[in-house]
Amino acid sequence: MARRKHKDQKASVAQRSAGATLLPAALPGQPSSAQAGGVIELTERNFAASVDGHPFAVIGIWAPSSASSREFASSFAAAAARNPDALFGQVDADAQRAVVEQFEITSLPTLIIFRSNIIVYAKAMLQGQELDEVVNTARALDMQEVRRKVVSVSPVAVGGAETPATGPATTATDDRLLSIETHLRPSVRAALTQLGPRLAAGGLVAIKDAFDPDFAERMHRSLDTCTAWRLYEGYEEHFHYHHHNVYELGEFPVDLAWCSKIFDSSSTKQWVSRLSGRPCVGPAEVSASWYLPGDHSLPHNDVAASDATSNRQVAFVWHLAKDWRSEWGGALFWCAKGCYLPPVFNTLWLFNVAPESNHFVTHVSPYARGKRLAINGWWTGVRATDKPLWQGPERIGTEASGIAIY
């Protein structure tokens, strides 16, 4: 079924001060035992009592008459078994119209995730492995940060709930799950307010231990087990390169595809636009690289068009090489400052693309032991970043003297 965007719940939702409830006792209208896979049946009568105050509730709204709902049932039950700490509940949309109307459901099946009464995800259900990705991302959210974005708090209620005097809440949407800020370490987020002037001045920014460790480990595993690498090489007049990459989205491992959505989300593009001073409103170019022994890339500045309407604005390299030794090569050499920068696990490099952003990747040694892995690419926008400038040598005397200064 095609995915359709629907509105968030009209009634406000937020955290209740009382302690969180795990699986509630049987209530009128509720089955006396959970269904297979730990999924409980939710109705208008027991929905609020079950979800209200629970730290992590995953709700599927479906209909027995929907083929896509029936196909999803096994994945949903399996996810419930893998996440015993979460409340997994399902709502029969045909029988529970009040719940459907309360949450303005427009597409079936739909998934709604609550974290302590705050909706952090509400969208048409995904399939298979994608369900695990959404649940794991919701689990990893920094709820203190999410709560700062919520205007008010109130219990979850269904059917005739009064609007709290404090006014409606602003809920965290699925795009929040895909924001790069969600996965950055809190100390990094706090320090990034000083980043803008450095990027605008043409600096290369290296952020050590940039992302949450679990996120970094997950993406390392994705690249380490990837089998879709292809050799890319070229020998132009001033630019040679030879390295292994995965560029095609259809060949991405599942976790890399999910990560590419994070780098391409509207929240992430707003974030990088604020940091860089560049309007990064175009599609993000995301790929993965594996530099094997002998792989390299000669000096270049990344200035190029992304498509007919977009140009590269801000480049990123997220290093995922583990225990890499400097003498193995594969370093980024930043020409403007003459810096030799070996890859370090979970370091994120950022720079504004410009004619002066020259850099190259040094040859990987034949004695290298390990994988020089990275996720890299560019955020794009319509702003022109000028064309590469070739500045020839200054000459002394005549052509015959053969003296040139570079």
Image: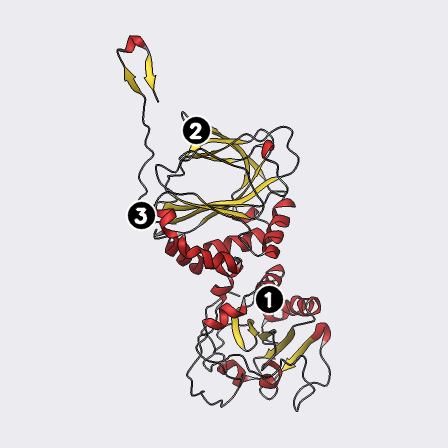
Residue 109: give x, y in percent of width and height.
56, 71
Q: Earlier in the sequence, mark 1 or mark 3?
A: 1
Q: Residue at x 61, y 78 (%)?
A: 54
Q: Which mark is residue 239?
A: 2
* C-alpha separation, residue under disc 2 versus residue under disc 3: 24 Å
Judging depth in this view, the residue of 234 and 364 nearest the camera is 364
Q: Residue at x 62, y 80 (%)?
A: 20
Drawn side of residue 197 relative to residue 217, left or right:
left
Whether residues under marks 1 and 2 lie with C-beta atoms below 8 angstroms apart, the answer is no
Q: Looking at the picture, which amino acid does disc 3 mark?
A: Arg
* C-alpha separation, residue under disc 1 versus residue under disc 2: 45 Å
Residue holding disc 3: 383
Judging depth in this view, the residue of 73 and 217 nearest the camera is 217
Residue 155: give x, y in percent of width and height.
53, 84
Secondary structure beneath dot 3 equals loop
Task: Please rate how many residues cluster around mark 3, counting C-alpha atoms within 10 Å: few if below 14, some from 14 to 19, many from 20.
Answer: some
Q: Residue at x 49, y 68 (%)?
A: 145
Residue 44: give x, y in percent of width and height.
57, 86
Judging depth in this view, the residue of 228 and 162 nearest the camera is 162
Q: Looking at the picture, which amino acid does disc 1 mark?
A: Arg
Q: Earlier in the sequence, mark 1 or mark 2?
A: 1
For residue 265, say whether it is visible: no
For residue 227, say whether it is visible: yes
Secondary structure beneath dot 2 equals loop
Q: Looking at the picture, which amino acid does disc 2 mark?
A: Phe
Task: Please rate how many residues cluster around mark 1, counting C-alpha atoms within 10 Å: few if below 14, some from 14 to 19, many from 20.
Answer: some
Residue holding disc 1: 139
Q: Is residue 382 above or below residue 118?
A: above
Secondary structure beneath dot 1 equals helix
